[in-house]
Amino acid sequence: MPSLLLSNPFLAPFFHWFARFCLGAVGWQTKGEIPDLKKYVLIAAPHSTNWDFVYFLLIIFKFRIPVRWMGKESMFIPPFKGLLKRLGGIPVNRTVQGNLVADMAQEFDRTDRMILTIAPSGTRQKVKRWKTGFYQIALQAKIPIVCGFIDYEKKQGGMGPVFFPTGNMESDLKAIQDFYKDKSGKYPEYGTAGSAL
């Protein structure tokens, strides 16, 4: 696994300063603290606009979290392939039948430290149900889930509670989604927590 640029001792302080400047300039605050964990799935919610990526990225920079993320394999082409991987990208071939959950769980097993960020809604459009892949990955890898959030109404973003999957998905997801009930997306009618079942 290539070393992440976000872990670079020379670049990390610059990313941190840049994020603090940008968030302060638009009047946003960060809340919570990074959990003292080497491996976890980081939820990115609610998700209702492309701007969510910008704010989540700035929050990640400010907290200095060396996150990984999944992207279409077609994105990872020269000359950008190496850079995208060093920015945390994990190529995913969606045309090949396979078990993505098991593959990601194995990826966690192969490394000493990994933080994987996932938007459970799977899209910025209106959804009735969350995709449950993030939960299944955490359950199979035997790692916790951390609630990352943004709230456009309060102009806040950051880290919420830590959940350890019990295997009772209905109960666990209800507890997780309860945390997001008062978190407002840019377009509240889209990307809501909804139901995962």
Image (tube, rainbow, N blue to C red):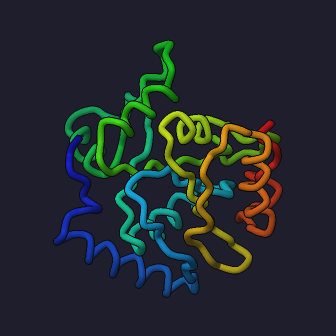
Image coordinates of residue 105 in percent, x first then y, are 45, 33
Q: Is residue 16 left or right of residue 141?
A: left
Residue at figure coordinates x 52%, y 33% from the top left: 140
Q: Is residue 57 above or below residue 15?
A: above
Query: For residue 111, which quarter of the picture?
Result: top left
Report the side of 126 relative to 145 (left or right): right
Q: Is residue 79 above or below residue 74?
A: below
Between 51 and 163, the one lying in front of the other is 163
Quarter-of-image position of residue 38: bottom left
Expressed as whole percent of the image width and height from the top left, the position of residue 166 reads: 66, 43
Vertical side of 185 occupied by 132: above or below: above
- Residue 125 image offset from top left, x and y in percent: 72, 45
Residue that appears at 50% across and 46% down: 143
- Total numbered labels: 0
Q: Which of the image's four quarters has the C terminus?
A: top right
Q: Residue at x 16, y 71 (%)?
A: 10
Residue shown at 46%/70% (left/top)?
Answer: 34
Where residue 32 sits in the image (x, y, percent)?
56, 76
What is the quadrant of the N terminus in the image? top left
